[in-house]
């Protein structure tokens, strides 16, 4: 397989995308001329937003970042990477608590796809505590999330509230 080293995949559920995710996307886009933000269907989570809704929010949020594409995929990340002929996966590490899960994932991916490399990026200090789960919790408990997510995401969460009332 002809591989392409000038591009990478940053995969996640992005339910919803946060400023922490966007910080990592901006950092990765400086390292790779082409970055695929890949929205995964996570069978372990019940999402707030559908895949098409997440794709739309992410595309809006990254529209000013050159070389970034937004797609969705299901199944194993290693299979998606092979289909895209991408050999580098970008992952974010916010805190020590992320490390164990990410370490297991990297070792598993290496076993299943030895040529797939993973690089880790840390978000800026002001984003290390932000998670999609926390954003949703704050929002649904009536808190202000404007410091954590792009305006389009905040609007989508408000709309979600309205549809559930």
Image (cartoon, rainbow, N blue to C red):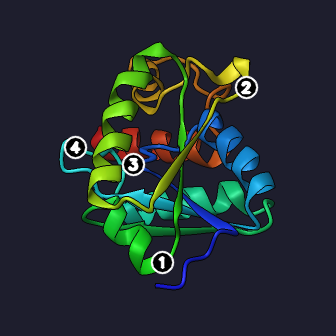
Q: Residue furthest left?
A: 43
Total tally of numbered discs in the picture: 4
* Residue 124, x across and y down, in percent: 73, 25
Inspect this view and state whether residue 85 appears. yes
* Outermost residue, bottom side: 2
Horizontal and vertical percent for residue 138?
Answer: 45, 19
Q: Do the numbered discs 4 and 2 sit on residues whose CB atoms are within 8 Å?
A: no
State the quadrant of the C terminus: top left
Label 1 secondary element: helix
- Which residue is identified by label 1? 84
For disc 3, the marked residue is 13
The alpha-carbon separation of the residues under discs 1 and 3 comes to: 18 Å
Which residue is at 61% across, 20% downward? 128
Q: Quadrant of residue 81?
A: bottom left
Q: Which mark is residue 124?
A: 2
Question: Which is more N-terminal, label 3 or label 1?
Answer: 3
Nearer to us of marks 1 and 3 is 1
Could you tell which of marks 4 and 2 lies nearer the N-terminus?
4
Q: Which mark is residue 46?
A: 4
Marks 3, 4: nearer the viewer: 3
- What SS does tag 4 mark? loop
154 in relation to 114, above or below: above
Q: Earlier in the sequence, mark 1 or mark 2?
A: 1
Of residues 90 and 52, the one nearer the viewer is 90
What whole-number distance in Å separates the C-alpha atoms at marks 4 and 2? 28 Å
Count residues near mark 3 (Cα–Cα under 10 Å), then give few for <14, some for 14-19, many for 20+.
some
The one of 61 and 36 positioned closer to us in this rendering = 36
């Amino acid at each position: 397989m002809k591989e392409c080293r000038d591009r990478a995949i940053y995969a996640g559920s992005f339910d919803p995308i946060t400023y922490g995710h966007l910080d990592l996307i901006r950092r990765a886009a400086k390292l790779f001329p082409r970055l695929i933000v890949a929205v995964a269907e996570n069978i372990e989570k019940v999402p707030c937003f559908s895949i098409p809704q997440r794709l739309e929010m992410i595309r809006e949020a990254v529209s000013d970042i050159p070389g970034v594409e937004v797609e969705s995929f299901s199944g194993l990340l290693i299979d998606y990477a092979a289909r895209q002929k991408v050999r580098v996966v970008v992952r974010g590490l916010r805190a020590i608590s992320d490390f164990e899960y990410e370490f297991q994932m990297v070792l598993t991916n290496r076993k299943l796809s030895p040529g797939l490399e993973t690089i880790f990026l840390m978000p800026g200090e002001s984003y290390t505590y932000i998670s999609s789960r926390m954003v949703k919790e704050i929002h649904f408990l009536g808190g202000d999330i404007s410091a954590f997510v792009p305006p389009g995401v905040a609007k989508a969460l408000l709309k979600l509230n309205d549809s559930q009332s």
